[in-house]
Every structure is written in C-alpha cells, then in structure tokens.
Image (cartoon, helix red, strand yellow):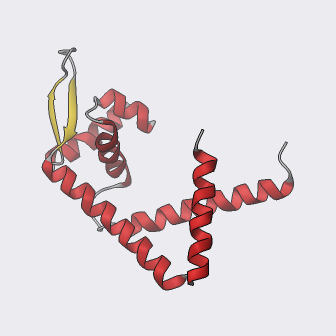
Amino acid sequence: MPEKDHEHLATELGATVSLLMRQMRAASPHGELTPTQRAVIGRIDTDGEATIAALARAERVRPQSMRLTVGALEERGVLARRPHPTDGRQVVFSLTEEGRRLLAVVRQAKHNWLAVAIADRLTPEEQRTLAAATELMRRLISE
C-alpha cells in the first residue's frame, strides 16, 4: 500500500500531466483534427498501416466509431486504403503525403508552444530541474 505522500504525488503528477497534454492539444491548429483523429494518424505513423478493427482495439473504441473517424480522415485525403495483403475481406489504411504533412504541422505547433512556454516562464535553473524531472518521468514509464 502506497504511503499518503506517494498517493498525493501520484495524483498531482497525473493531473498535471493531463493538463499539460490538454494545453498542448489546444496549441494545435484549430479545426485541423479531433483528438481521436490525431490519435489515429499518430498510431498509423508510429505502428504502420492498420485495419479499422486493429485501430479500434488500440484506441479502445467500437469499430463503428473508428469507421467514422477513419472515413473522415480518408475523405480529407489524410488516409488511403488498400486491400489487406492476406485477408481479402479487409482493408488497411496508411498515411498519405497530406496525412504526413498534417501530422507534422500539428506536432510542430505543440512542440513550439511547449518550447516557448519553457523559455518564457521558467528560469534557467527551473529549466534544468524540468530536464531532471523529465528523465525521472521517463524512468517511471520504462520497464
């Protein structure tokens, strides 16, 4: 059983990370992508082409919901479909050049916001502390 101090720190860290992620998402170009759409193209960028079923499982949503998300991205020219290489009943989706461009724009906007916030709001000493804390957080998530 964790100690009260550890529980409090865990709660505060989780809430702070959540708020940071929300702020970074807000820094993305408005109207470009929904959070689910960003998650889908980010996953395909990282993991490679995928079926709707695989994307739905990975994002923990119903296949019907994922179909709508993928359909909207395909309509915008962000995703392209092709037949599944071994299962003729399925299709796989991959990023188009437009999808890669859009993902880069969204990521760059988030990183720019964070870099400016760090430079403008933190002293050099605080920036070093943040760098150390970042390494500690990385250790928390590594196995």
In the figure, is residue 89 to the left or right of 125?
Answer: left
Image coordinates for residue 106, horizontal then vertical, percent = 30, 62
Q: Quadrant of residue 27?
A: bottom left
Image coordinates for residue 127, horizontal then vertical, percent = 56, 76
Above or below, 131 relative to 83: below
Give the position of the C terminus as an image quadrant: top right
Q: Is residue 1 visible?
A: yes
Above or below, 26 relative to 96: below
Q: Quadrant of residue 51?
A: top left
Image coordinates for residue 108, horizontal then vertical, percent = 31, 65
Residue ID at (48%, 85%): 120
Residue ID at (21%, 38%): 94
Give the position of the N terminus as an image quadrant: top right
Question: Quick one: 115 or 7, which is closer to the camera?
Answer: 115
Residue ID at (14%, 49%): 97
In the figure, is residue 89 to the left or right of 34?
Answer: left
